[in-house]
Structure formats: C-alpha cells, structure tokens
Amino acid sequence: MSQIRILITTTSFQDTPGKHHDLLMGDAYDVERVRGPLPESAILALVGDYDAILCGDDAFTRPVLQKCVPRLKVLSKYGIGVDKVDLQAATELRIPVTFCPGVNHVTVAEHTFGLLLALTRQIPQHDAIVKRGEWHRGVGRELAEKTLGLLGLGRIGREVAKRAVAFDMRVCAYDVIWDDAFAQQWGIIRQPTAEEVLRHADVVSLHMNLSDDNRAYINVARLALMKPGAYLVNCARGGLIDEGDVAAALQRGQLAGYGADVVEPEPVVPTNPLLTAPNVVLTPHVGSRTYESVERQAVMAAENMLRVLHGQTPHAQANTL
C-alpha cells in the first residue's frame, strides 16, 4: 500500500510541540512541510500530488484547487477563518474543506484585551521611554464605565464581552445571529444595526468574518459615525478595514488609537500606512498563538484531515458536498 502524501503549510502547527505531531507519525504518512502562508503562485507550484493538505492562511483559489484534483481528498484548515479558500470551487470540485471552530476563542479574546490595554494605557510608548533611560509619564484612559461595541457576537465576541464586563465596561453589540440568553446573562445591549454600535461605543472591536460584502467595512464613511477619540481594535481580518482611511483618521486625531493583530496583505508590506500612523499597536497575527490554543487547533486540524482520509466524519466541515 502506497503512503498517504500530506502537505502542511501552517507554521504554528510545525513550530509548536504537542501531541498533534504524534498523529502523523508512522510509515503510513509521507509528510512534507513548507512554511506559509503562501500566495497563489507559490502554492500553485506545490500542489497536485498530495492526498491531503493541512493549511493556514494560504491562497487556495480556484486555479490552485483545480490543480489539486483528482488526488486531493481533503483540505484541512488550521483555524476558523476560511476566507482564503474558494469554498464554491472546492464544493464544485468535491473537495471537503474542514476547519476548527471553538478552539481559539479564549486566546483571541485575551489578545484583544491586551491590545486594548496597550492602546489606552500607552504601554508600548512608556516601555520605550523607560528603556531609553527617560522618565516622561504620559496620561492614559480607564476602561471602566466606557462602552465597548462589538461587531460580531460569536464565540470570540462573547469571550471579549465577558472580559469587558469584568472591567466594569458597558457592552453593546450587533450580530445577525443573536444569542439572547447570553446577552441577557451578561447585560449586553443589542443594537439594531452595526452603525448604531459605531455611534455609541468608546471602543469598537471587530469580530466578523471577512466576505466580499464587508471588505473595507470600516471606511471613511463609517469612521465618521464613531465618537471623536474612540479606539478601534481588530483581531479578525485586515481586509475588514480600509487601512488608508483608518491611518488618516488617526493622523487627524479622529481615532485615538488602533490595535490590530491582522493587516492586508500579510505579511505586512513597508508601504502599509498604519506603520507610520500615531498610536497604532500591531502584532503579526499571533492572537491565536498560545501553546494551549495551538495544540487544540493542531489536534483538531489533524484529526479532521485523518477522519476524512479514513472515511469518517470530521469534527467540522465548512462546505457541504
């Protein structure tokens, strides 16, 4: 019996120790590891001779997926976002796309609050001042009694809401799918539209999926709805904002600060306007990268892949065949 050929492109899976590596041990699997995320041209040059691919944020476009068939049996996404995968093409080509919901919501929520505290208390700036041997003390802002506005009240949004309540913040939110029981339990105000969230919030945190309909959702028009001096945090997708518009709002003081774990494109390019905007804290898409979360995601991604290969039902599948 020939070996099952597997391609792994996500660096978190490769770099973090844990039992996920044990799942792919043995003579049955021929595993190749490449460090992503990869653009379409790079991934296109690789695929075509694999039974399974465990991917990160690589560009699985229609041409890439077409080259994967007929051999590819499963595309396993490490993580929850599948916006880099052409799901319609995968479905037409009969390629199951699995993903890992419910594994990183606590981790990303903690990172969201880390960015928010860094912005409001100017932690990076004060760290730099002290390390220069200086002692200039800026003035920060408290979170208590401020209003946090959530665009998206899914798993991550709910975890952020719970932490906001612990900080004595008021919370309002908008989501198409509304969890009324959770909102009542935690005292979350339901706003009728996303625009109303923007109008009422002192801090806006994005927890939406990226789609063609909401690309550059936070643009000059919606920024104008926000309170002067509000903060914006984005641990979802870089494509949700118009980075030029956000940078301009920061330059003129309309926004007090922007914290993000994501940019568009990734990795960040030198011309990204956020790199020179004031009071911006950026991290390199590490919101879900803790030892605990990586192992949960990696095990689920590997199990999803192996279950499909062996004719079993995966934990979660993003498309219906």
Image (tube, rainbow, N blue to C red):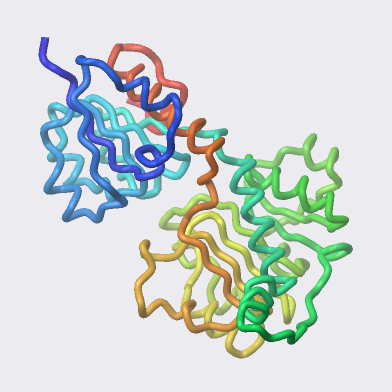
Q: Residue furthest top?
A: 1
The N terminus: image quadrant? top left
Seen from the viewer's position, the closer of residues 138 and 110 is 138
Report x, y in % for residue 257.
64, 75
Q: Is residue 114 left or right of residue 95?
A: right
9, above or below 124, in the image: above
How many numbered discs, if any? Answer: 0
Q: Residue furthest front?
A: 133
| Quadrant position of residue 75 | top left
| Quadrant position of residue 310 | top left
Seen from the viewer's position, the closer of residues 193 and 94 is 94
Report x, y in % for residue 112.
64, 56
Q: Is residue 62 left or right of residue 10?
A: left
Q: Residue at x 68, y 86 (%)?
A: 134
The C terminus: image quadrant? top left
Q: Residue at x 59, y 48 (%)?
A: 108
Report x, y in % for residue 84.
35, 49
Q: Residue at x 70, y 43 (%)?
A: 158
Report x, y in % for residue 141.
80, 73
41, above or below 54, in the image: below
Q: Residue at x 31, y 34 (%)?
A: 54
